[in-house]
Image: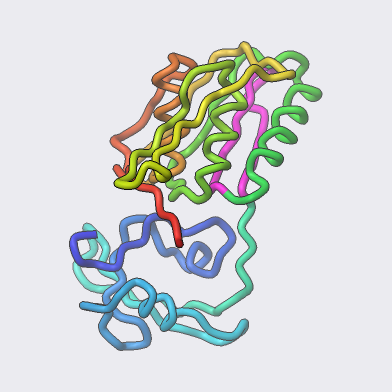
Amino acid sequence: QEGFLTVIYPFEGTPAYKAGVLAGDRIIKVDGKSTKDLKLEESVKMMRGPKGTTVVITVVREGAPNPIDFKLVRDIISIESVKSLSLKPGYGYIRIFNFQENTRAELESALKALASKEGNLKGLVLDLRDNPGGLLDQAVEVSDEFLEGGEIVSIKGRLKRNTKRYQAHPNKTKYPFPMVVLINGGSASASEIVAGALQDHKRALILGTTSFGKGSVQTVE
């Protein structure tokens, strides 16, 4: 962001999260080497390494008078896509951390677990805060889970074959309960598609702060 290598969100349970790295931290050095003018791929390559080895990142944090060093112990990163819990009888909470290949399946499992525990759900909070995005098809499928029809998202490209429209379909399992979707400045890309689709179809109330604003889709050809 603005030429700085910036942390969007440190996933829970990862070395960075455990060390205290926060969303918005700007990484200015990796093992003492400046990240200025480096491409993202180059910076990532510097930070990656064998499990159990260490890397020191230096960050600038808003409100902190001096740069902060974090010594991270590298590990194998396994990110859980969906977590859920009961807020109170009849009201569920589901957080989607990112959109992976199995996100919709995990969402369906979470909804079934909440319904079996609480009976018929009366309301749901869907938390997309600090969700950096992921797979487009999973964002479409998650949106489709709560919509019965209409356009979810469309893509327009220079070439006709790159122009696509994704539609919602009637679901076997209906979810008539009201929904609130939480977003913030770290909600980007696929998470913005879900929040936007649910808002456009008046399926959910959106609460939070302005999202990241990444309205692009990438295709490798």
Q: Is residue 176 left or right of residue 23?
A: right
- Residue at 59% from the left image edge and 16% from the top image edge: 148
Q: Please provide percent x and percent y for residue 106.
A: 69, 41
Q: Quadrant of residue 122?
A: top right
Q: Please provide percent x and percent y for residue 58.
A: 32, 77
Residues 7 and 193: in front is: 193
Q: Is residue 205 left or right of residue 49?
A: left
Residue 208 lies, with reference to residue 11, above or below; the image says above
Q: Quadrant of residue 157?
A: top left
Quadrant of image for the C terminus: bottom left
Q: Quadrant of residue 195?
A: top left
Q: Please provide percent x and percent y for residue 51.
A: 62, 82
Q: How many marks?
A: 0
Q: Residue furthest right?
A: 116
Dominant SS type (magenta): strand
Is residue 185 visible in the rendered image? The answer is no
Q: Which residues are magenta?
A: 81-99
Q: Is residue 117 left or right of residue 212?
A: right
- Residue at 61% from the left image edge and 58% from the top image edge: 79
